[in-house]
Amino acid sequence: MVVGEVAETTEVLVIGAGPGGYAAAIEAAHLGRQVTLVERGRIGGVCLNVGCIPSKALIHAADLASGPADAASWGVDLSATVDMSAVHHRIGEVVSTLTGGVERLLHAAGVRVEQGTARFARRRKVVIDGGDEVKHFEFDHCIIATGSRPLELPALPFDGSRVLDSTGVLALESVPASLAVVGGGYIGMELGTALAKLGSQVTVVEMADSILPGIDPRLTRVVARRLRGLGITVLTGARATGLTDDSLVVAAAQGEIAVPATKVLVAAGRVPNTDDLGLEVAGIELTPSGHIEVGPDRRATPDILAIGDITDGPALAHKATAEAEVAARTVSGLVAAFDPAAIPLVVFSDPEVASVGATLDRARSEDPAATEYRFPYTAGSRSHTMGHTEGFVQMVADSAGTVVGVHMVGAGVSELAGEAALAVEMGATLEDLAATIHPHPTMSEGLVEAAKAASGHPLHVLPRR
C-alpha cells in the first residue's frame, strides 16, 4: 500500500545505519532526542556487513590456513585445508552476532528504524521509499551518514562475475586460481594477501610508484618484502587497460603485460554516496569530488549535518563514529566540534601497518628541531618469541619532547594504535611514555623503547653516535 504525502515528524532523522549513522542515532537518543534512523540495506552498513568486519574475519581464516608454513620453523608439523563454505558460514555468524547487537542497542535506546531509500523532498522533508510503501518525514535536524561505494573503472566495469569489488571478493565461493588486484591501497593489500594465503596466485597492479600510496615508504618496504615472500607479484607505475579471456592487460614501463586473472578485484578508491539524495533541494552543494562540506560541528546547513565518508578526510569507520558523537551533541543543542589531534590509520596487511599523527617531515615543517627514533623489532623480546621480528616502531617528537606521531609496521601493531593515539591526543611527552611501565614480554614495549631512545636514553639498542 502507498501512503499519501501526510508527513510524520521526528526531531532527528538519521540517513544511513553504518558505524556513523547508528552511533549518531544511539547518541542522540541517549541525549533525549526523538530519533528515526533510515537504512536501505542492512543495519551496520558496508563496514559491518560486507567490509571491515567480514574482511578481517577472512584475513584471520587466511592466517590460520598459512599457519603450517610458520609452524615448521618451530618444529611443529601441521597441515591445513580450506573449506570456503565453512569459512563463509563462520564469517556470517560473526556478522550476525554484531548486527544483532547493534539492533538491540537501537531498540533499547528507543530509536525508530525505517527500511527504505531516503531522498530530500524539501529543505526539512524526506521521502522514504520502502518499495511497497512510501513515507514522508519532516525533521528538526537531519544527520546524513550514507557512506561510500567502490569506484568503478571505465576499462573494468563491475560485472559481478569476473570483475569484482571488495564485496564480491568477500563472497567468493571458492579460491580463484589467479587474482589480479587493481589498486595497491589498504583494501587491495588486505584482500590480496588473504587470497594469496588461501592459495590464489595474486598480482597487484598499482599506478603509483609504491604500494600503500601516502604511507611512509619505510613502512611499506617491510610489507613489500613480505609480499614477495608470499609469492605475490607487485607491478607499480602500472595501469590496467582491459581484459582477455584469461588475463588482465596492464600497461607498464616495460610495455604491455598479460597478468593471470581468473578473477579481478578493483580496489582503486571509493566514491561518496551523495549523488541520489536530492541534496540540491536541501540547499547543499557538493564539492567536485562529491563530498559535503561541513563545519567543525558537522553542520552543512543550520538543519542538516553530515558525517563519515561523505565528508572530507579518511574514509574510516572510527572517524565516522567519532563524528557521530559530535553531530548528536550538536543536534541536541550542546557545543561540540570535531577537532582530533590524530586519526589512527591501520592497514591489516602482513605485517600490519599503523600510523598516528605527524610524520617526521610534517613535524619538521612546523618545528625544524623535531626528531624521531625507530626501535627495530629485531631488538624486541616478544617479537622473537613469536617468530615475527620484521618491522619497527617510529616515534616522532617535537623540540619540547612532546610526542606528535607514532608510525609502526609489524605483527599486531593494530593493537598498539590506540595507545599511540592517546599519547598524541593528550600531548604526552617522551618521558611520559618512557616512565610508563609496560608488561614484558609484549609488543607494546616497542613504544617504551622508542620513547627511551628518542629521549636519549636507549635500553635495548645501542645509543646513536
Image (cartoon, helix red, strand yellow):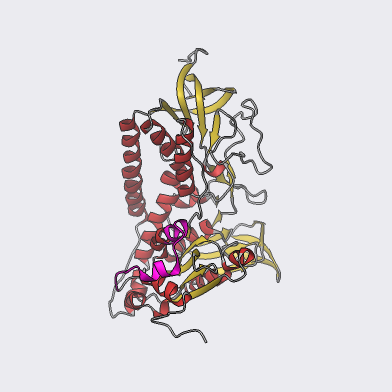
- Place of residue 429 in the rendered image (x, y in percent of width and height, measured from the top left): 45, 66
Q: Is residue 103 left or right of residue 311?
A: left
Q: Is residue 128 above or below residue 327?
A: above
Image: magenta residue range? 420-440
Residue drawn at x 32%, y 53% is 86
**Hey, which residue is sitting farthest left in the picture?**
76
Residue 161 sits inside the magenta stretch: no
Decide which of 336, 266 is in the foreground and name it: 336
- Place of residue 388 in the rendered image (x, y in percent of width and height, measured from the top left): 39, 74
Q: Is residue 272 above or below residue 349?
A: above
Whether residue 194 is visible to the viewer of this picture, yes or no, is yes
**Hey, which residue is sitting farthest bottom in the picture?**
465
Q: Is residue 79 left or right of residue 316?
A: left
Q: How many marks?
A: 0
Residue drawn at x 32%, y 31% is 107
- Place of residue 89 in the rendered image (x, y in percent of width and height, measured from the top left): 33, 49
For residue 328, which quarter of the picture? Answer: top left
Decide which of 114, 381 is in the foreground and name it: 381
Screen quadrant of the N terminus: top left
- Place of residue 207 in the rendered image (x, y in percent of width and height, measured from the top left): 65, 61
Whether residue 16 is visible to the viewer of this picture, yes or no, is no
Residue drawn at x 51%, y 54% is 341
Residue drawn at x 45%, y 24% is 11
